[in-house]
Image: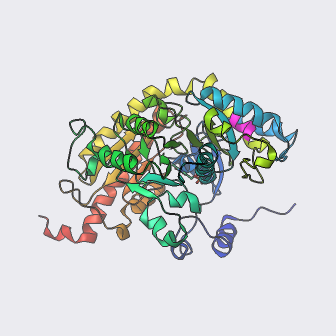
Amino acid sequence: MTRAPSTQQLRDWDRRYLWHPFTQMQEWEKEEPLIIKRGKGCYLIDTEGKKYLDGTSSIWVNIHGHRHPSLDRAIKKQLDNIAHSTFLGLSNPPAIELARELIRIAPKGLTRVFYSDNGSTAVEIALKMAVQYWQQRYPNAGPKNTFLHLKLAYHGDTIGAVSVGNIDLFHARFKPLLFPTVEAEPPHCYRCPLKLTYPSCNMACTEPIEEIVKNRHGELAGLIIEPLMQAAAGMIPQPPGYLKRIRDLCTRFNVLLIADEVATGFGRTGKMFACEHEGVTPDLMAISKGLTGGYMPLAATLTTDEIYRGFLGRYDEFKTFFHGHSFTGNPLGCSVALANLSVFRRDKTLARLASKIKLFRRLLAPLEALPQVGDIRQRGFMVGVELVKEKTTKALYPLGAKVGHRVAAIARSKGLILRPIGNVLVLIPPLSISDKELEKLVDILKESIETLHIDAESINGTHNNRQ
Ligand SMILES: *Cc1c(COP(=O)(O)O)cnc(C)c1O
């Protein structure tokens, strides 16, 4: 047997051969990459045996912790049968059982499951289904083939998903490749562009969206939204009632509502799906991140009977949905997703989450007093802590100052892994986190922000003016 490469060897190879996502590699090449070898519960363990609290659920995917015995067992058991067989012209038991389970827990009215393997593809599939549906269902109506979406939206990194996204830093460069869409201002209560306050505003921010839908529904195949929370935008929540109003608007004007629950699904907001908070059933729903408990790449697009039926016909009518992936319906992924859902049931994960959400809120409250914390936004277990240069004016730190990254670096040295979005520190711990671990997570975050305080002042040179 050959010896496992040393940490130093791995670091060298990483810097020599790899290209990491969303990473400035020129900086990375100068760093000592942290290499995670193992995990246990809410902890990640590096090649040197050092433990870190997984404050992002490994970028929003992990649900019941790492090395969960039931999830581990499900994969091992499936492996004794088969790792993968195609879903084109064949089926497999875990994919069938999972579809049935997903329909049981999904918002009422969603009746069909189309598998893929990541959040972006689940979104692409929803967009393509919507366009083809209108062509086939109402062939004589005008072409409904564009989409309305919110500014600051993030629906993934493939070209279709980027087309309905709007985060300039990630997307602007690819404009020439994107299809045209219609954009609307999202609600943003902390920085309300209308300078109004909820609830006395009566959500005036929905009026321009109503206008757009009223005037352009003839060309709109759908409206796509991250329900309750625009996550990658920096955790920007929608006020209560917002999603319901959007649903009603879509129904009224025959525009399909596409809910991108990739981030919010599987308990992250306190309910299984964010749409449940508003009693809303979308026409299409994309799920991925938490679907397998964070174990395997798997995704699904769920839809209604009405849309499904729009694709039925004789073969030579060619109403088939011509879309699929090599790993569609992957049995290993589906097995572990089934185990994920049975742990939800057996451990009453959602019922037990309610008190943890309250504790999380209580623990976060003192952070509001910190001079550089502008806003704390929480929806269940999705939290954004926005750092500002000046609290009263809400003045932003320049992106180049990398304040979020610097806080994350301090947190890492204290044993907590965070991944900020600009100046927003994002906390999305696994739902299985204990009260004690939650306390530790917020403690480290607080200490890290306080440490940065001194630092940021020296950078701005303001400490010279202090007494
Ligand atoms: C992460 C994310 C996606 C993209 O999922 P990937 O698996 O990374 O392709 C899409 N929509 C939302 C809301 C997400 O948070």
> Residue reaching furthest front?
140
Q: Position of residue 392 (x, y in %)?
A: 17, 54
Q: Residue at x 35, y 34 (%)?
A: 240
Taking the image as shown, residue 234 lies to the left or right of residue 17, namely left
Q: Position of residue 407 (x, y in %)?
A: 39, 58
Q: Quadrant of the N terminus?
A: bottom right
Q: Is residue 17 above or below residue 340?
A: below
Q: Which residues are magenta?
A: 334-338
Colour treatment of the image: rainbow
Q: Is residue 120 visible?
A: yes
Q: Is residue 334 above or below residue 461?
A: above
Q: Residue at x 67, y 36 (%)?
A: 309
Q: Nearer the viewer, residue 242 or 446?
A: 242
Where on the picture, by quarter, is residue 334? top right
Q: Nearer the viewer, residue 444 or 191?
A: 191
Q: Position of residue 374 (x, y in %)?
A: 27, 51
Is residue 335 found inside the magenta-colored segment of the image?
Answer: yes
Q: Nearer the viewer, residue 161 or 434?
A: 161
Q: Position of residue 114 (x, y in %)?
A: 69, 42
> Residue reaching furthest left?
467
Taking the image as shown, residue 387 lies to the left or right of residue 154, namely left
Taking the image as shown, residue 244 lies to the left or right of residue 35, namely left
Q: Is residue 70 visible?
A: no
